[in-house]
Amino acid sequence: MDKRTLKTRTKLTNSYIELKLQDPEGVITVTEVCRHAGINKSTFYRNYLDIDDLYNQFMQEKVNELFNAKLLNTFFLNPEKCFLDIKEKLIATPSDVKRFLRLYTADYCTIAERTIKDALKQCNRDQVNEVMLAFISGGVAHVVMSGFNTMDDVDELSRIVRYLAKMDR
């Protein structure tokens, strides 16, 4: 993606987030987002199919920033490092984006679960079965969205993952 397109998409996404945070229950239109961003509607439609597409792409991008195959490859070998890396990324996330994601936790967690499960399947762990993947992906997504409160949270998650990995051998 070129810099100009990235800048446009960032403006549109930021405008959408700001409008949703002002009125979480309200319906946001393409016209409102474009007016707020100072961008023409035709430019919006060159980047997104509709307002739902903007929302879905934004949510997937946020999930991808936290959970990717490279990071999750360390999941079974060093769960503490994996969770600490995720925590650092969460800490670095701008506060308005965090507030937005908390408003839409269910959607975010659904996308995160699917993404984590797909990434873990690529970790070359033949012994990882569907039940274990579902438990891990769902649990990690929900714990991450609720936030790590202390290092004990990281330690506990890591202990559970190590235990599950041993059970599966």
Image: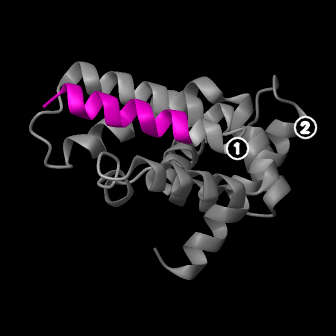
Q: Residue at x 18, y 32 (%)?
A: 128
Which residue occupies the foreground of this view, 95 or 5?
95
Q: Which of marks 2 and 1 precedes in the sequence? A: 2
Q: Main secondary structure of the magenta part?
A: helix
> Which amino acid, by three-letter code, is at mark 1?
Val
Q: Which residues are magenta?
A: 155-169
Report the residue that reaches farthest toward the top: 131
Q: Position of 45 compared to 67: left or right?
A: right
- The image quadrant of residue 24 is top right
Q: Quadrant of the N terminus?
A: bottom left
- The image quadrant of residue 126 is top left
Q: Which residue is mark 2?
A: 22
Q: Residue at x 56, y 50 (%)?
A: 62
Which residue occupies the foreground of this view, 63 or 92?
92
> Which amino acid, by three-letter code, is at mark 2?
Gln
Indicate the position of residue 73 as horizontal and vertical percent values: 29, 54
Q: Position of 87 compared to 111: left or right?
A: right
On screen, residue 11 above or below 72: below
Residue 92 bears which disc, if any?
A: none
Residue 30 bears which disc, if any?
A: 1
Q: Quadrant of the C terminus?
A: top left
Q: In the image, is residue 167 part of the stretch drawn in magenta?
A: yes
Instruction: Identify the image's colour scheme: rainbow, by chain, secondary structure or one colour.
Output: one colour
| Mark 1 element type | helix
